[in-house]
Amino acid sequence: MVTTEGYTARPGGAQAKLLAEVHEHEQERNLSLVLAEFRNYQQGVMPAGPGARDLVGFYEQIDGALARPSDTPPHVRTGDQDLRNLLSKRAGTLHLGSANYCWFAEPAKALCLKLAGTPNASKPLTGMCDSARCPQATHHPCHRPIWAVTVTLTRTFLGSLSRPQKSERIRLQAELDRAQRVVDEIDSATAPATTKEPDADQ
Ligand code: SF4
């Protein structure tokens, strides 16, 4: 309330100014997150989740461009500020889910919009997010605690079910399997490269 008082008291366009400042703040926060994940990628700490391959591909492009000075615009060099310029468009697509990052670059691919029957919406429906299945979702080490808690709680609920609650047992087991898979994927993607198992299909 105190924060917005100055804006509401100002005649004409105050709310628009407030929204613009909020947007600017969010963009700055997103840039910091995208940059932090790019640094993680450079250290071998990879994203997990259905959108991981796409994000890694993007980071590879940035890495490649920075490694080839002739491909890099003259005003862009390897300093943090210049790197942020390269990452800014991607940062504009980032939405923060409670247990994932949502890269809302293509509304047509958004699982939440498909489920809601609103494929042309301009924003994701994070309340309907199914990040384990959406191609625009990634999971990172910062999301591991919430998935690990989900595993623990779901396991506890499963253990407390009585024998006749078969459909509930099936539903909870699927939830447990999904949460455990996300935890395992995050662990696998963030393990030091030397300890990673080779892919089965390699
Ligand atoms: S399902 Fe989740 S990750 Fe996918 S677009 Fe919707 S909010 Fe984003």
Image (cartoon, helix red, strand yellow):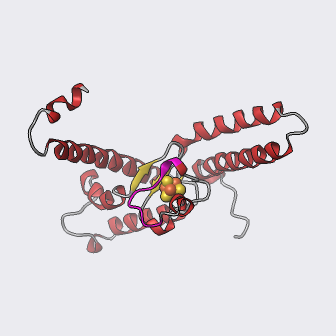
* Residue 172 visible within the image: yes
Residue at left offset 53%, top offset 57%? 112
Residue sitting farthest toward the left: 11
Residue at left offset 72%, top offset 37%? 154
Q: Quadrant of residue 59?
A: bottom left
Vertical arrangement, residue 77 with respect to residue 186, above or below = below
* Image quarter (top left, top right, bottom left or bottom right) of the N terminus: top left
Q: Is residue 1 left or right of residue 30?
A: left
Depth check: give the residue in front, 53 or 172.
Answer: 172
* Image quarter (top left, top right, bottom left or bottom right) of the C terminus: bottom right
Number of marks present in the image shown: 0
Q: Position of residue 25 (x, y in %)?
A: 27, 43
Residue at left offset 72%, top offset 70%? 201
Q: Position of residue 114 (x, y in %)?
A: 54, 64
* Residue 137 visible within the image: no
Residue at left offset 82%, top offset 43%? 169
Q: Is residue 177 left or right of residue 1?
A: right
Q: Quadrant of residue 6?
A: top left
Q: Is residue 51 left or right of residue 8?
A: right
Magenta-drawn stretch, dominant element (helix, strand or loop): loop
Q: Which portion, as a residue range, is magenta?
A: 119-127
Q: Is residue 135 left or right of residue 29?
A: right
Query: Magenta stretch: residue 2 in it?
Result: no
